[in-house]
Amino acid sequence: MAASCDFDVLVVGSGASGLAAAVSALAAGARVAVATKGSLQANNSSKAQGGIQAAFGPDDSPERHAEDVWRSSHETADRQLVEVLTSEAPSAIHWLEELGVEFARDGDRYRLARCGGASAARLLQVGDRTGLAITRALRQVFEAGPGTAFENAPLHSLEPLENGWRARCGEHEISAATVVLAAGGRCYAEARERGELSTNHPNATGEVTALAVELGAQSRDLDALQYHPNGGAWPSGMQGYSIPETTRSYGAVLLNIDREEFTDSLGPRDVVAQAIVDEVANGKGVETPDGRPAVYLDTTRIPTADAERSLPYMLRRYRQAGIDPLTEALLTYPVLHYQNGGLVIDPDAQTSIEGLFACGEIAGGTHGRNRMMGNSLLECVVYGRRAGRAAAVGARG
Ligand SMILES: Cc1cc2nc3c(=O)[nH]c(=O)nc-3n(C[C@H](O)[C@H](O)[C@H](O)COP(=O)(O)OP(=O)(O)OC[C@H]3O[C@@H](n4cnc5c(N)ncnc54)[C@H](O)[C@@H]3O)c2cc1C
């Protein structure tokens, strides 16, 4: 089937999901190309700080992880996709370790933090640059293999052929038996349209989702966009920075103008973000020096040892901007962060169109209408691997 194609598998996008798909398709023996909008490392995945979830704790299990996802999604997630996500989480972590990612440990156990909406400590971390560590390892493995990278090659058209696909990516025309769409979400473009701040990389613009929908791929929950509860509100250089949720895992709490707690700081993301918006609307917020709404995130409650070990990047960024989070509370307000919905996929990450796969933020269902922190990197690895394998098998016809 693939004889007339340049490649067996074309992966569009080079974040954690695209790279995981490419590495897996190569391991399955496929001829693989990755076409991406900028450089291989230009993506949201590299910006992810907090961590990745997997049930390793003594009081935890994949079933409990799945229940937390279901509850946090307000019972809107696809249960089959969630079960795959949480049951394959431990093996996804071991796979990343084999590729060179070193997760933080306390003795012989992983260092686990509890994230918003979770009933157990489950978040593995590499300092507070977890996404960078994961994407760097995946990229290095991909670059060491026989795959072909097309950088500065944004997908702008995709056409079904009798035996595969023809894609126009930048100046290149690429044919492949199967295609994996891994081009991420659209929150950068959406924030710009709304005149709001976003945590996202400028490449997060959503045109690949639109292209797939035009081809007839089914989508779900595309209207459900997530606000990160803790965007940096001040100083101006930190506006749009996502203060890691692990600040709250390690003891930081949200306070109003009277320095009173007004919500469970480790509640589900949408609940915490809404509580901040409501507190400000009720006149209990504070104002930044440039007149923006905010509340306090009291990071002075984080033990110094935890902060230095698990939040070094956040500390460095704020200290460079003139604020020491361990002696002064931060000013924060929700900021546009994540596309919860996306293309409908099955457990092999195939969209409703045969031979067209999707994984990572571009896909919907795994988180329903509200994602928990730490499950996106996990989704990228679990479904990236599945997409790569299934696309390689599909290419053999
Ligand atoms: C600041 C920040 C912190 C985060 N922290 C966490 C965290 O701690 N834990 C967690 O689980 N999740 C976190 N997330 C979410 C998570 O990082 C992302 O949702 C996830 O990494 C998305 O991966 P992806 O591979 O789907 O997309 P991305 O990493 O965004 O990659 C998309 C790729 O597609 C490319 N692309 C875009 N358009 C095109 C096109 N037309 N043609 C070709 N290529 C294209 C892009 O250039 C990029 O290479 C965070 C996100 C941000 C922004």
Image: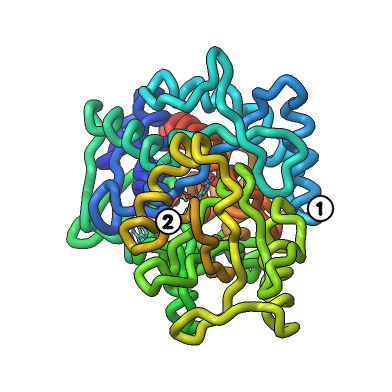
Which residue lies most toward the front here?
327
Q: Is residue 90 above or below residue 190?
A: above
Whether residue 211 appears in this view of the structure is no
Q: Please, what is the three-letter code of the amino acid marked with disc 2?
A: Asp
Q: Position of residue 114 (x, y in %)?
A: 66, 39
Q: Is residue 53 above or below residue 193?
A: above
Residue at 35 percent across and 69 percent down: it is 237
Q: CA distance from mark 1 to mark 2?
A: 40 Å
Residue at 63 percent across and 46 percent down: it is 251
Give SS at disc 1: loop
Q: Position of residue 318 (x, y in %)?
A: 39, 58
Q: Is residue 45 above or below residue 294?
A: above
- Closer-to-camera residue (31/272): 272
Residue 324 is tagged as 2
Residue at the spot of label 1: 75
Q: Tell me if mark 1 has few (under 14), some (14-19) or many (20+) residues whose alpha carbon lies within 10 angstroms of its own.
A: some
Residue at 56 percent across and 52 percent down: it is 300
Please state, as top left, top right, bottom left or bottom right, where the N terminus lies in the image.
top left
Residue 334 is drawn in which quadrant? bottom right
Q: Tell me if mark 2 has few (under 14), some (14-19) or many (20+) residues whose alpha carbon lies within 10 angstroms of its own.
A: some
Q: Position of residue 28 (x, y in %)?
A: 40, 23
- Closer-to-camera residue (335/90): 335
Which residue lies most toward the left here?
171
Q: Please, what is the three-letter code of the amino acid marked with disc 1?
A: Glu
Residue at 78 percent across and 30 percent down: it is 63
Give SS at disc 2: loop
